[in-house]
């Protein structure tokens, strides 16, 4: 399997469309989640996802080496910011801060019930809504770290902030999410 760098260079140098397709498939999931976290609607995120790849295609020669994921995150973040600006919104980098059942009957099913599927979807939506309430800096760091799987060094470089700021924003994001999602009890009890 080709590395990301090889795929991107194969497309940029020779116009190898299958390489670009492989790159899109490989990065689609994290990039879509990253954009959904930055933008207010799924439709905005889908549009920004398409815009990201259009920009990658148009500026095929702008990649200068290094982490392809960081490069793609930079292009995606730029597409999201431009989309928000066109809508009259901005992203600021300043943070504000038992009863007789057998063991077999008690065993959970491998297939989720409709209620469990609903609960899981509701939990995911609750988490997405909580992430959207975070200040922009902490939200971007959280999404780049979790969805983009970027290192803190890459995040700090991308956001043009000291690495300590990126680490602080991550801590801010996780603490606020714990409060918003009711995770403080786990912290107090040690679970």
Image (cartoon, rainbow, N blue to C red):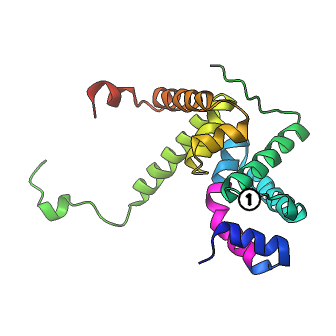
Report the residue at 51% width, 29% height from top: 171
Q: Is residue 146 magenta?
A: no
Report the residue at 55% width, 47% height from top: 146
Q: Quadrant of the C terminus?
A: top left
Predominant secondary structure, magenta span = helix
Start and end of the magenta stretch?
19-31
Q: Is residue 186 left or right of residue 87?
A: left
Q: Residue 166 appears in which quarter of the rendering?
A: top right
How many residues crowd mark 1 within 10 Å: few (<14), some (14–19), many (20+)? few
Q: Is residue 22 left or right of residue 84?
A: left
Residue named by callout 1? 65
Q: Quadrant of the N terminus?
A: bottom right
Q: Is residue 159 left or right of residue 150?
A: right
Image location (x, y in percent) of residue 9: 77, 70
Q: Nearer the viewer, residue 42 or 189?
A: 189
Image location (x, y in percent) of residue 69: 66, 56
């Amino acid at each position: 399997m080709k590395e990301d760098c090889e795929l991107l260079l194969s497309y940029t140098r020779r116009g190898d469309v299958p390489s670009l397709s492989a790159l899109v498939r490989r990065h689609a999931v994290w990039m879509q989640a990253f954009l959904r976290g930055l933008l207010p609607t799924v439709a905005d995120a889908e549009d920004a996802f398409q815009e990201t790849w259009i920009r990658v295609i148009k500026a095929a020669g702008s990649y200068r080496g290094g982490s392809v994921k960081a490069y793609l995150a930079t292009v995606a973040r730029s597409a999201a910011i431009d989309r928000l600006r066109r809508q009259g919104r901005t992203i600021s980098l300043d943070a504000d801060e038992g009863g007789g059942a057998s063991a077999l009957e008690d065993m959970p099913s491998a297939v989720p019930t409709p209620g469990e599927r609903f609960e899981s979807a509701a939990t995911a939506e609750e988490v997405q809504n909580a992430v959207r309430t975070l200040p922009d800096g902490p939200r971007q760091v959280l999404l780049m770290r979790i969805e983009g799987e970027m290192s803190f060094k890459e995040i700090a470089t991308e956001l043009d902030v000291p690495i300590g700021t990126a680490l602080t924003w991550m801590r801010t994001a996780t603490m606020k999410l714990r409060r918003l999602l009711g995770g403080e009890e786990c912290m107090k009890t040690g679970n």
